[in-house]
Image: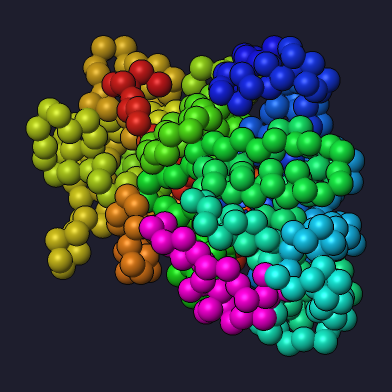
Amino acid sequence: MAETENRPSNFIRNIIDADLAAGKHKTTHTRFPPEPNGFLHIGHAKSIVLNFGIAQDYNGLCNLRFDDTNPEKEDIDYVNAIKEDVNWLGFKWDGDICYSSNYFDQLFGYAEELINKGLAYVEFSSQEKIREMRGSLKLPGQNSPYRETSPEENLKLFHEMRDGKFKEGECCLRAKIDMASSFICMRDPVIYRIRFVNHHQTGDKWCIYPMYDFTHCISDALENITHSLCTLEFQDNRRLYDWVLDNISIESRPHQYEFSRLNLEYTLMSKRKLNTLVTDGHVEGWNDPRMPTIAGLKRRGYTPGSVTEFCKRIGVTKVDNMVEMGMLEACIREDLNEAAPRALAVVDPIKLVIENLPDGHVEWIDAPNHPNKEEMGTRKVPFSKEIYIEREDFRESANKKYKRLVIDKEVRLRNAYFVKAVRFDQDEEGNVTTVYCEYDPTTLGKLPADGRKAKGVIHWVSASEGVEAEIRDYDRLFTVPNPAAEEDFTTVLNPESLVIRKGYIEPSLLNAEAQQGYQFERLGYYCFDGKTNDEGKMIFNKTVGLRDSWGNGDK
Ligand code: ATP
Ligand code: MG
């Protein structure tokens, strides 16, 4: 049961299997609990695939719950973006969307229960003082002077907090646990604080908001979550999770299990830091194709299948590590190699004039959309007297290793004819501007009768029928593998992470749909951005490079 073809087993699935076998639960109920304070990133995809994947494979349920206890940082736009991203990845949550804020009334009631039991108190010390009294890993904390206030008095004060009688920061509610605990999170953690801010779900109903550690476990219990999966940094907080549930009257009893976060080289995995990149204008927005966000990956041309495949390959463990970008890229490359139609584009053009064609000649050639998938059909590609080829595909002279166009030598134009270069023009700086050649009309789709071989195959686009486009090539966003370790990660941004070029595309690409991936032959995988630039030219984003190269010229 645990291991399916699509999803290998892991320690969490082993725990679930044991729980089900022991009759502890009849089924599974997981949840994905993002805070709506930014767009989701690929790290969240790992959690989504884990939580929703368990529901799919065990016939269980999975909730989408917004953990929305921090209204200053949150926004309804993030709520909507997150919903869209979860859907795009191919997952459906069970029932209505949940919000921790739906439970504010119940949470308030549980806080009252703790107060009545003498397990929570209203604290009037300053934040600084609270920090000081908390102690350190070496030093135990000190009891607050407010720790012994009576439950009646605390209840009255807590109600006054709710009724707006105190200023922000003037007081807060703390759980009364153990100031000498070796787990700092157990040293009378704050569970409610005052914030006079409007909440995207509850408006101005509340001026006190519960803290994450108090909210999360209760939300899990109220939703009958069986296995509450979170990342390793909450390991210590599991004590607090259990303490809260042990001390309130609630029947359901979820358990928290921690797994390691996904870290990806050369990028960041934190909504807060990604937000800085957006607000400081280092990227175009949350969906900039260089961003590790789901929205960025989507715009870059990643498919949902490639992202979920990546999550499957990285697995779920308790070991912190850094995953190479190449692993993510391999997933989309494999996907597109199978599924992406081929197309011709030239990104650094020089002109090639075919002298033995009449002026104005245009001929529409059938070109296969995929080299080994006939079922993907063909398209018409215009071949004309003047075409563009890549600057790097021509040299005046070269040795045998250079499998491209050289004076007096022949190459095949992809899907078209053999051409032989005869001469070329240069500008004043010595840059080649135009190459003149002759084509062999007997070589369309076949080798010449005399058995001549071409040096190689090069791609091309008709100069008269091709369409100008903006080609965006992307590189890693940061120059160091772990930008999060820098004091200021904005100092290690890669200034060359985006290179914009003017290129030419074959006209069939005018019908490209947004994010549909193509293999621009010999260049890489690209997708239409969905937008045009200021000059009305279609923008194409590079998804990932190719690794393979071609043989020597029989097509
Ligand atoms: P961020 O710092 O990016 O905001 P977070 O953990 O604070 O991350 P949440 O919105 O609270 O973000 O996370 C929702 C869920 O996604 C949590 O269960 C969290 O543990 C998980 N998650 C977040 N980042 C990662 C990651 N890099 N790898 C795996 N799971 C993650
Ligand atoms: Mg967070």
Q: Which of 115 and 272 is in front in this view?
A: 115
Where's residue 420, x and y in %?
A: 25, 34
| Horizontal relation, residue 217 to residue 349: left or right | right
Question: Was residue 347 drawn as part of the magenta stretch in this picture?
Answer: no
Q: Which of 400 and 361 is in front in this view?
A: 400
Q: What residue is rendered at 38% in x and 41% in y?
A: 322
20 versus 472 height, above or below = above
| Horizontal relation, residue 213 to residue 482: left or right | right
Q: What stretch is highlighted in magenta?
A: 122-147
| Horizontal relation, residue 423 to residue 99: left or right | left
Residue 421 sits in which quadrant? top left
Majority secondary structure of the magenta segment?
A: loop
Question: Was residue 126 drawn as part of the magenta stretch in this picture?
Answer: yes
Where's residue 159, x and y in %?
A: 87, 75
Q: Total number of numbered labels? A: 0
Q: What residue is rendered at 86% in x and 46% in y?
A: 249
Examine the rendering and report whether any part of residue 400 can be seen: yes
521 versus 207 height, above or below = above
441 versus 535 height, above or below = above
- In the rendered image, which quarter contains the N terminus? top right
Examine the rendering and report whether any part of residue 360 can be seen: no
444 versus 359 height, above or below = above
Residue 56 sits in which quadrant? top right
